[in-house]
Structure formats: structure tokens, C-alpha cells
């Protein structure tokens, strides 16, 4: 059954009024003048009521789809191949005879939605296996172990070139390789922050200036990490298990020497 104003309460009530006047013996011309409806419409609804006993608008077939099954298949193939490309570009590149809004509807009909793409490092297979192995190694570690673990890292925030802001993908596929946007590198304006965290939450956050080297990292460990960790998380003499990644700064000789002096 059709929806919208065609079958609204007000419209059905007006049609019922037409039938009521007709059943009272009023001519169709006078009904049209009384209700403000054309005489042709009055006659049509009287005829519909006599034949079907209904005053509702019948469902209509609607206009034909502007895209054919071939076009629909091309759209889905393009989205599967290039999920980080917008519907506007897909419409333009495929020379589709429709508006980008129609392209989006076809994509949605295939149960593919638009999300913000995940941004991750481009890892090799060996790096992935090493990370998975590290996670499995400590999978069974209990709370007493993690209460002595301190994670540290620095983050460089910088201006980057414009990237894809959306990704067409199916549900639960956020981290599939084709849906991940590789992290951009840029030499533009930036700022560095260093932070440590543990099982109970974040620790100290420090803004760094200039070039971050091994010597600067040792200074942060000595002046910030040790005193704040001992004060906020792990009191002396309990051991501290320090975890950081294998960046050149963290693996430099000066850092290794400092760690050996602070077992």
C-alpha cells in the first residue's frame, strides 16, 4: 500500500466526505464545488468505492531504476577493489548515468557501509608474526605481573597531505588489509609527546622539543619516568618492567647502557 500524504488521515477523511455527499444524493458537480476537488477526481473515487470499497491510493510501480544490473555489478566491483575511494569518484570513473547519491544507495543495498578507515603501519609478514608471538607469550600473565609493567612511547603529531577520509567496507572488516590506510609521513610542522602508562591507567605526559635522540630519551627516563612511576605506580623496591618498541632511539647504545645500569 502506498504511504505518505496520498494515504494520510486528512486525505482519506476528505475522500470519505466525497462518498458521504454522494450517498446523500448530491450530484458530482456540486460535490466538486463543495470539496474543492475536480469533478474527474470525484468521479474516480466514487467509482473506486463502488468497485473495490476502498479509498486508499494503490501502490505504484514507481520510476525505473537508472542503473542496470551491469552497472550495479561494476559499482560493487569498484568498491571491493578501491574501498578508500569516494562514491563521487566511483560515479565519475565508471561513467555512471546517475547521481553519486544513487551510487551510494547501490552500495548500501549490498550491505556495504561507509566508515572512517583505520590508519596503521605497513607491517611485513615477519613483523606481524613477531607481534603475535609477543602477545601469545604473555597471554596467560595475571594481574600481579601487569601491575609491574610500564609501557612508554612517544607520538609525533604532524601536518600531512589530504588522505582518504572514508572507507566502503562490510561489517567487522575494519582491519582487513585492503581497508587500512597506511600511515602518512610528513616533514611539515609537528610536535612530540612522550607518555608512560600501566595497568591502572595513564601516567606522566611530557611535551618534547627539538630532535628526540637517545640522550634525550635517557634524560626523560631519568628525570620523568623513574620519579613519577615510583610515586604514582610502583613504589621502591618493587621491580619495574619497562616496555618500549624497537625504534632507533630506544635501541641506541646510550639507552642500552642506561638500562643496564638500572636493572
Image (spheres, helix red, strand yellow):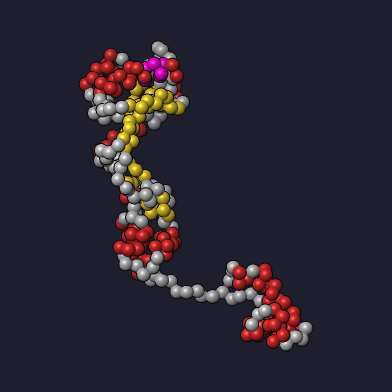
**Image quadrant containing the N terminus:** bottom right
Residue 198: where, in percent of width, then height? 42, 25
List the single residue furthest toward the top: 237
Image quarter for residue 28?
bottom right
User: Is-magenta flag for residue 199?
Assistant: no
**Image quadrant containing the C terminus:** top left
Give above or below for 112 relative to 260. Answer: below
Give above or below for 227 relative to 74. Answer: above
Q: Left or right: where does residue 29 sit relative to residue 60?
A: right
- For the residue pair 163 and 159, the one nearer the viewer reads as 159
- Principal SS element in the magenta part? helix
Residue 172: where, in percent of width, then height? 42, 48
Image quarter for residue 91?
bottom left
- For the residue pair 47 and 150, the one nearer the viewer reads as 47
- At horizontal 33% and vertical 26% (from top left) the residue drawn is 208
Q: Left or right: where does residue 35 sit relative to residue 183?
A: right
- For the residue pair 257 and 19, the one nearer the viewer reads as 19
- At horizontal 54% and vertical 75% (from top left) the residue drawn is 60
Residue 257: where, in percent of width, then height? 24, 17
User: Is-magenta flag for residue 227?
Assistant: yes
Residue 231: where, in percent of width, then height? 44, 16
Note whether residue 151 is visible. no
- At horizontal 37% and vertical 59% (from top left) the residue drawn is 87
Note whether residue 243 is visible. yes
- At horizontal 34% and vertical 43% (from top left) the residue drawn is 119
Q: Left or right: where does residue 147 sit relative to residue 160?
A: right
Give above or below for 213 relative to 19. Answer: above
Give above or below for 179 relative to 134. Answer: below
List the single residue furthest toward the right: 24
Residue range (magenta): 225-230
- For the residue pair 239 and 35, the one nearer the viewer reads as 35
Amino acid at each position: 500500500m502506498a504511504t505518505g500524504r496520498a494515504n494520510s488521515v486528512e486525505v482519506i477523511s476528505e475522500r470519505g466526505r466525497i462518498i458521504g455527499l454522494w450517498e446523500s444524493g448530491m450530484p458530482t458537480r456540486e460535490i466538486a464545488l463543495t470539496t474543492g476537488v475536480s469533478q474527474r477526481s470525484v468521479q474516480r473515487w466514487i467509482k473506486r468505492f463502488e468497485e473495490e470499497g476502498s479509498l486508499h491510493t494503490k501502490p505504484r510501480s514507481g520510476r525505473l531504476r537508472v542503473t542496470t544490473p551491469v552497472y550495479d555489478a561494476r559499482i560493487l566491483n569498484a568498491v571491493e577493489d578501491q574501498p578508500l575511494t569516494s562514491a563521487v569518484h566511483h560515479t565519475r570513473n565508471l561513467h555512471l548515468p546517475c547521481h553519486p547519491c544513487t551510487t551510494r544507495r547501490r552500495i548500501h543495498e549490498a550491505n556495504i557501509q561507509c566508515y572512517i578507515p583505520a590508519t596503521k603501519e605497513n607491517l611485513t609478514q615477519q613483523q606481524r608474526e613477531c607481534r603475535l608471538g609477543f602477545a601469545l607469550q604473555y597471554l596467560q600473565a595475571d594481574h600481579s605481573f601487569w601491575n609491574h609493567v610500564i609501557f612508554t612511547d612517544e607520538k609525533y603529531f604532524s601536518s600531512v597531505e589530504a588522505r582518504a577520509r572514508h572507507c566502503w567496507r562490510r561489517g567487522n572488516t575494519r582491519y582487513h588489509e585492503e581497508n587500512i590506510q597506511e600511515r602518512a609521513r610528513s616533514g611539515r610542522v609537528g610536535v612530540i609527546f612522550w607518555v608512560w602508562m600501566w595497568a591502572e591507567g595513564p601516567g606522566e605526559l611530557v611535551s618534547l622539543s627539538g630532535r628526540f635522540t637517545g640522550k634525550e630519551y635517557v634524560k626523560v627516563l631519568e628525570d620523568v619516568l623513574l620519579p613519577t612511576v615510583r610515586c604514582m605506580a610502583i613504589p621502591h623496591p618493587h621491580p619495574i618492567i619497562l616496555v618500549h618498541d624497537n625504534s632507533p632511539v630506544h635501541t641506541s647504545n646510550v639507552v642500552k647502557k642506561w638500562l643496564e645500569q638500572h636493572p
